[in-house]
Image: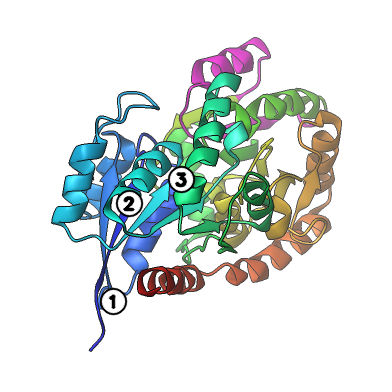
Amino acid sequence: MKKTYNILHIIGGGEVGGAEQHVLSLIKGIDRTRFALHLVCLSQGPFSNLAMKNNIPVQTFPMRFPLDLTPLPPLVRWIRQHKIQLVHTHGSRANLLGRLGAKWLGIPTLTTVHSSLAHDYLSPWAARIALGLDRLTLPLTSGIITVSEYLAKEVALRGGRNLETIYNGQSPIFFADPTSSRHQFRRQWGIPAEALVLGTIGRLHPTKGHTYLIKTAIELLKRFPNLHLLLIGEGPLRQTLEAELERNAIPYTLTGFLPSAYLALPAMDLFVLPSISEGMGLVLLEAMQAGVPIVASDVGGIPEVIRAGQDGLLFPPGDVAAFTKACTAILENHTLSTTLTQSSQKRWHTFSMDSMVRETEQVYTRLIES
């Protein structure tokens, strides 16, 4: 008879990004005959609401500020009460409380690193504090999963051990009629049918490089007067970006957070990801499936997903001239666009959800049984 292990996921939960989607996918895909998964959020926000909509019970232990340790004692009591055997943490706050709590109780802890800590914060001092805390608590971690080899090297440099790369997985997405979906989304958001749409999906945060997208759009409008930007996501830069778009008279649609953002992909003529830092770029797998040509920055784990010149075009992060050139090459060359999308639609299968879940289950079993 197989043993059932109690696993706890801890995450901030203040937004819905790649890390949150990753946790949701693991909880949904895990073998319930072998693992009982629990979820703790450190704030009441969009992710905890999304989890509850998916019938996933959520316990919240609010952290009022990054170094707030007051939730630790009640969290430890909760872990003990639910007989948790492994704590799986995601993000700086979760790492701090989860690693300390697991050490207190003498149970293993696992961390998944989804992004580069140095670029996750709006201020340099906040990034330095996060990196310092991570270095201090890394020795308490039984194992570390990174979502790209790039991140594995970065974490190793600050003392990470027992590292394993498990790429994010993507489930198949289906569009019954892509042409109909394209027209429907454009009508819904008031995007002209004849517009040439450059779209991106992601947090409105400096690390996602929206500022470079706007600068590139200014250049592209000289050649493509029907250009229209579609920005999907929410974040601290929203007002700044809107002001910049208005000031430069760039036609745009800013939707805010959309729960099923992938449904917008058929409305795009080109998907762009101009990040200055990116752990892997889970959204790229959705764009690949949807058959939308891709231009992305050559940074972090992106080149591990997109083979330059084969599945999409890559450019040096922050290089507006190279970004503009790559977009122009695809928009003016239908043959190139088709070649890239055909290749990417075959490649995305490499990053399967089943592989991600099964490999993570193996790590759980190894850490608990050792």
Residue 260 percent across, percent down from the top left: 41, 48
Task: Name the residue beneath numbered marker 2.
Answer: 102
Foreground pick, 208 / 130: 130
Say whether marks 3 and 2 touch (CB < 8 Å): no
Residue receiving disc 3: 261
Which of the two labelled residues, at mark 2 and mark 1, occupies the earlier sequence position?
Answer: 1
Residue 68, disc: none
Alpha carbons under labels 3 and 2: distance apart: 35 Å
Mark 3: which amino acid?
Answer: Ala
Extreme residue toward the bottom, this view: 1
Mark 3 residue element: helix
Q: Amino acid at mark 2?
A: Ala
Q: Is residue 362 left or right of residue 13?
A: right
Residue 228 position, x and y percent, is 64, 31
> Distance between the Cα atoms at labels 1 and 3?
32 Å
Q: Which mark is residue 34?
A: 1
Magenta-colored stretch includes residue 287: no
| Quadrant of the drawing holding the N terminus | bottom left
Amino acid type at mark 1: Arg
237 magenta-colored: yes
Residue at 67% of width from left, 47% of height from top? 154
Q: Is residue 193 visible?
A: no
